[in-house]
Image (tube, grey):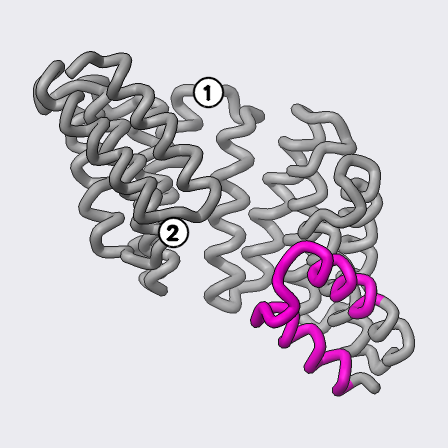
Amino acid sequence: NHPDVAKLYSNLGDLYDKQGKHKESISMYEKSLKITLLVFGSKHPDVAKSYNNLGSVYDNQGKYEEAISMYEKSLKITLLVFGLNHSDVAKSYNNMGAAYRHQGKHEEAISMYEKSLKIILSVFDCNHLDVAVLYNNLGILYLDQGKYEEAIHMYEKSLKIRLLALDHNHPDIANSYNNIGEAYRHQGKHKEAISMHEKSLKIQLLVFDHNHPDIAASYNYIGEAYRHQGKHKEAISMYEKSLKIKLSLIDHYHPDDAASYTIYKICI
């Protein structure tokens, strides 16, 4: 029952979570939590972290009620220990916002994200990368709601900060361009969408291995935009590039590949 053992269990939980081994991850996090509760008591930041970790895995599993329950336990401790204006409190609100968004509870998600943003803006400079993350999350939420102008506004705020804080060939900047592109595509602005996705792709080809799943996603996005423009030849070229990468990475019968192949057949 030593804290170092708890930390090792937590680290193993992180690794299993990254591998998508949720059951094993939960087991490790629960072992870490058990030791942490014994050593530090129920009102310690490490206990809050354990609850947060469990919440993240439940969220990844689609068990959103369990995730929110864990995030609320984490939040209760962080508020008690740190007070309202602390980055860990903002993190808990952000995580709860994500879980609510995944449930389709948009109003609750906006409330959580806005609480998180308010704290982050009080703790950090307005050009801090955590602010960019929250603007991006709000953009995703607005996109889910079909509020495309609001989504673009949030994505552009996020991009502006990232361009100031990061190297211009950073993957997060590529992510911002893709997000803006998707919002344009939903608006039917396919030319603008292609421009954004091509900017994203250019960065990804510089920083990633050419068989990276993000590159496959960008080719697919560009293909979608071309398809909606009626440019089937260009769309097929993009879909084929996307499919080739996906087939090199995962089982040939993965549902994502089936979807790509179906669209490809439609274009033909």
User: In the rendered structure, which amino acid carries the disc numbered 2?
Assistant: Asn
Looking at the rendered structure, the number of numbered marks drawn on it comes to 2
**Residue that numbered label 1 is attached to:** 124
Magenta-drawn segment? 238-266
Q: Is residue 140 visible?
A: yes
In the rendered image, residue 224, in percent from the top left (x then y), is placed at: 74, 71
**Residue that numbered label 2 is attached to:** 60
Report the Cα–Cα distance between label 2 and label 1: 28 Å
Instruction: Kindly give the residue lying farthest to the right in the view shown.
Output: 233
Q: Helix, strand or loop at disc 2?
A: helix
Q: Is residue 119 magenta?
A: no
In the rendered image, residue 109, in percent from the top left (x then y), is placed at: 34, 52
The structure residue drawn at horizontal position 27% and vertical position 40%, both measured from the top left corner, is: 54
Quadrant the N terminus occupies: top left
In the rendered image, residue 200, in percent from the top left (x then y), is placed at: 76, 47
The main secondary structure of the magenta stretch is helix
The structure residue drawn at horizontal position 46% and vertical position 20%, both measured from the top left corner, is: 124
Q: Is residue 186 visible?
A: no
Find residue 24 and name its label: none
| Left or right of residue 57: residue 126 | right
Q: Helix, strand or loop at disc 1?
A: loop
Tell me if residue 57 comes above or below residue 163 in the rendering: below
In the rendered image, residue 265, in percent from the top left (x then y), is placed at: 76, 85
Quadrant the C terminus occupies: bottom right
